Structure formats: C-alpha cells, structure tokens
Amino acid sequence: MHPNPTFREATLDQNIAFARDRAFGTLAINASDGPLISHVPFILSADGRTAELHLVRSNPIVRALQAPLAAVIAVTGADGYVSPDWYNSDDMVPTWNYVSVHIRGVLQLADPDTLLDLLTRQSAAYEQRLSDKLPWTMDKLSDAQTAKLTRMILPCRLDVDQIDGTWKLGQNREDTARLSAANKMPSGIGQELQEIARLMADPPA
C-alpha cells in the first residue's frame, strides 16, 4: 500500500465493494523456496471477513498448504500514466495513478466436499452480471465432466485479518490541476482510462 495517507481515505466498505466487484486478484504466499503467486477469481463475503477461491491441485500454493499460511490477495483496478504537462502547472513530475486493494489473512484448504457448492456460487455470482444471456449453471455439466473437475481442483478459504486500499488519484494536487489531468487521462496509456479519469475527477473521501 502507498504510505501517503492522502491516498488511503477510502472506507473499509468502499474497499470491500471494490474487491467484490473486481472478483479477481493476485494471490501470494511466502513458501520455503520464496514467494508463490497465482491469479485467481474469488468470492469475498459482504462483511469482508472471508474470501473463497479454488486452485488446481498441481498449483505450488496447494502443495505448500500443508498447514494454514499467511497470504494476501492483491486486487488491482484502473491505472494510468500522468504526464506533468497535463496539470497546467509548473514544477510537476510524472507519476502513475491507480487503484489497488490488498486482502490479507490466513489461507487454508477447505473441505473438498464444499467444492461443488463453491463453484456453483462462483459461477452464479459472475453469470448474473452478464445481461445478454441466460445464466450458465453447473447442472449443464455431465457427470463425467463434473467428476473430472472435482479431481483437478480444491477449494480454499482466506480468513481475512485486514483490508487496505490505495486510491492514488492525484488527491495531493490542487483540484484544478487534478481535474485538468483527469480530462487528459482518456488519451493516455494504462488500463481502463475512462474509469481512472472518472475516479480522478471524484476521488473517494
């Protein structure tokens, strides 16, 4: 997380809502041979206390989970480069604006018997956000495919201790400079430039 408190004024509820909406992040643990990282879809509970996910059995993180381990899921959002020229002000420097939420806690393997329930809830959560089709459901799988799937993956649970967010949106600049840069952002480089421009124009407080 960025150390400047100006970029960390989003509320816990805002950070939870952001992570729940993104629903995809980078899972990291410290293992005996160094850090292990995996990119995972997840479900974060409404209160932010539990994140549920699944991993393929051959994933090195699964092999490391002989006992519960400290872990973090980094959830990134829109980001973009900010040119000093965009501020219409002197003595500015380049920077990169972004949104990121870190979910920290203890990761452990869940009961394998809960896997189908997790997959059902995950697919339902994602499918309901698609407006142009009827939701896909797990019962569309054959018994053979379901059996194959459950042999390949395992459910995991992160018991959350802490959720922190960095919303670096130029809040440390004068409003006129920040808004000037926000207006230029859609023509820049980065990801989801329209969204980062919108957030720069109206940062969380």
Image (tube, helix red, strand yellow):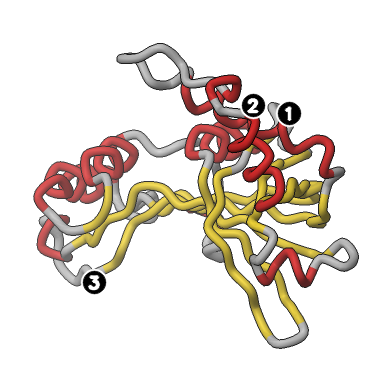
The residue labelled by disc 2 is: 120
Which of the pair 174/28 is nearer the observer?
28
Q: Which mark is residue 90?
A: none
Callouts 2 and 1 close, C-beta under 8 Å:
yes
What is the distance, in whole Å, between disc 2 and disc 1 at their CAs? 5 Å
Q: Residues within 10 Å of mark 2 (few under 14, many from 20)?
A: some
Q: Considering the image in quadrants, where does the N terminus appear?
A: bottom right
Residue 35 found in image quarter: bottom right
Callouts 1 and 3 close, C-beta under 8 Å:
no
Q: Residue 190's x, y, as percent?
A: 24, 57
The residue labelled by disc 3 is: 93
The answer, for residue 11, to whether it is visible in the render is: no
Q: Is residue 18 left or right of residue 155?
A: left
Residue at image location 64% in from the left, 56% down from the top: 56
Q: Which mark is residue 117?
A: 1
What is the distance, in whole Å, between disc 3 and disc 2 at their CAs? 48 Å
Q: Amino acid at mark 2?
A: Thr
Q: Amino acid at mark 1?
A: Asp
Residue 27 found in image quarter: bottom right
